[in-house]
Image: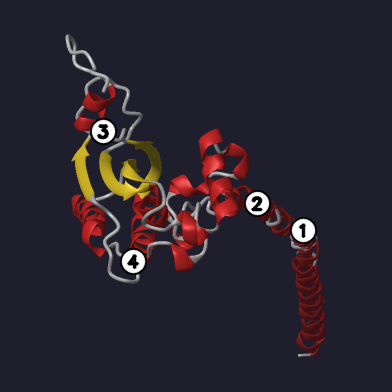
């Protein structure tokens, strides 16, 4: 019994030693398991991605570059001011835009005469009586429609009736018109011709108005209104005037020269 009692402590000691060894081993295992998280924490330091954040800032610095190309797009806008509408605002056909230095000798002489004798005499119906031809050539815009061109021609022909003085006296003696049909290639792009006839230079001067006559009291308001209407459809105008020779009476020529074979008798 005593021997058996003594063995029991030894077994308890053995069990205690085994248990303590097991606990120590378990503790060592736990320490071994606790150590690995330390090295795993080192690679988990993603501080480098924080340094990669400046990379997105580079696109932000690249954003100012597109505005630099914007001025190149604004260059075409500078071509917009090229508007040919000033002729319509002044109410004159393109032919009336010539500067004083560009005038021919005859045009300067006509304007000088108007200044010397006054507009009242210059535009009077009896000023230099005689047939005067007034030729107008028009070059239309390529974009003009048939209806617009027909309306320009209609209004021009109507001037033969609506162009009148304050007392109702008719100014234009006649108007002819036609489309360019020559094959010589010398038309210079003109599309339509108008041939007008006046009974005096005074009637022609009253009809023409600006830029020769600038006072509205001494030029035709109907012609001025036509200029304002037709100007937006016309590229250029050519004007040529000439005076028809006045035919001499037949009896005057016969009286001045004796017939052949006849002798004059002296009484």
Q: Please name the residue that numbered disc 1 is placed on.
A: 54
Q: Please name the residue that numbered disc 2 is placed on.
A: 71
Element class at badge 3: loop
Estimate the spatial distance between the alpha carbons at disc 2 and disc 3, rounded to whole Å: 70 Å
Q: Is residue 18 left or right of residue 177?
A: right
Question: Is residue 77 visible to us here?
Answer: no
Between marks 1 and 2 in the image, the one whose residue lies nearer the viewer: 2
Residue located 24% across and 51% down the image:
173
Estimate the spatial distance between the alpha carbons at disc 1 and disc 3, rounded to whole Å: 100 Å
Residue located 26% across and 58% down the image:
159
Query: Is tag 3's residue or tag 4's residue first in the polypeptide sequence?
Result: 4
Question: How many numbered marks have been drawn onto this rendered protein structure?
Answer: 4
Q: Please name the residue that numbered disc 4 is placed on.
A: 165
Q: Residue furthest front?
A: 267
Query: Is tag 2's residue or tag 3's residue first in the polypeptide sequence?
Result: 2
Query: Is tag 4's residue or tag 1's residue first in the polypeptide sequence?
Result: 1
Contact (Cβ within 8 Å) of mark 2 with mark 3: no
Question: What percent of the width, then of the height, locates residue 186?
Answer: 32, 23
Element class at badge 1: helix
Query: Is tag 1's residue or tag 2's residue first in the polypeptide sequence?
Result: 1
Between marks 2 and 3 in the image, the one whose residue lies nearer the viewer: 3
Q: Please name the residue that numbered disc 3 is placed on.
A: 247
User: In the picture shown, does residue 215 fall above or below 232?
Assistant: below
Q: Residues within 10 Å of mark 1 (few under 14, many from 20)?
A: few
Query: Is tag 4's residue or tag 2's residue first in the polypeptide sequence?
Result: 2
Estimate the spatial distance between the alpha carbons at disc 3 and disc 4, rounded to whole Å: 28 Å
Q: Is residue 37 left or right of residue 71?
A: right
Residue located 26% across and 54% down the image:
156
Residue located 56% across and 34% down the image:
105
């Amino acid at each position: 019994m005593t021997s058996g009692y003594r063995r029991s402590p030894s077994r308890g000691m053995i069990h205690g030693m085994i248990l303590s060894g097991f606990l120590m081993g378990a503790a060592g295992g736990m320490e071994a398991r606790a150590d690995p998280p330390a090295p795993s924490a080192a690679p988990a330091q993603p501080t480098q991605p924080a340094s990669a954040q400046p990379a997105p800032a580079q696109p932000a610095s690249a954003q100012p570059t597109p505005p630099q190309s914007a001025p190149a797009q604004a260059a075409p806008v500078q071509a917009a001011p090229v508007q040919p509408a000033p002729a319509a605002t002044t109410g004159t056909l393109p032919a009336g835009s010539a500067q004083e230095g560009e005038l021919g000798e005859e045009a300067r002489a006509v304007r000088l005469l108007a200044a010397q004798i006054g507009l009242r005499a210059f535009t009077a119906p009896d000023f230099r009586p005689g047939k005067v031809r007034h030729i107008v050539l028009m070059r239309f815009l390529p974009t003009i429609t048939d209806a617009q061109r027909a309306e320009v021609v209609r209004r021009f022909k109507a001037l033969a009736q609506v162009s009148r003085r304050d007392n109702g006296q008719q100014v234009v003696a006649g108007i002819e018109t036609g489309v360019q049909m020559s094959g010589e290639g010398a038309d210079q792009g003109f599309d339509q011709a108008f041939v007008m006839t006046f009974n005096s230079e005074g009637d022609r001067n009253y009809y023409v108005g600006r830029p020769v006559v600038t006072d509205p009291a001494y030029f035709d308001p109907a012609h001025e209104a036509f200029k304002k209407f037709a100007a937006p459809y016309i590229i250029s105008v050519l004007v040529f005037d000439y005076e028809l020779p006045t035919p001499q009476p037949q009896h005057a020529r016969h009286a001045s020269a004796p017939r052949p074979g006849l002798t004059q008798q002296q009484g």
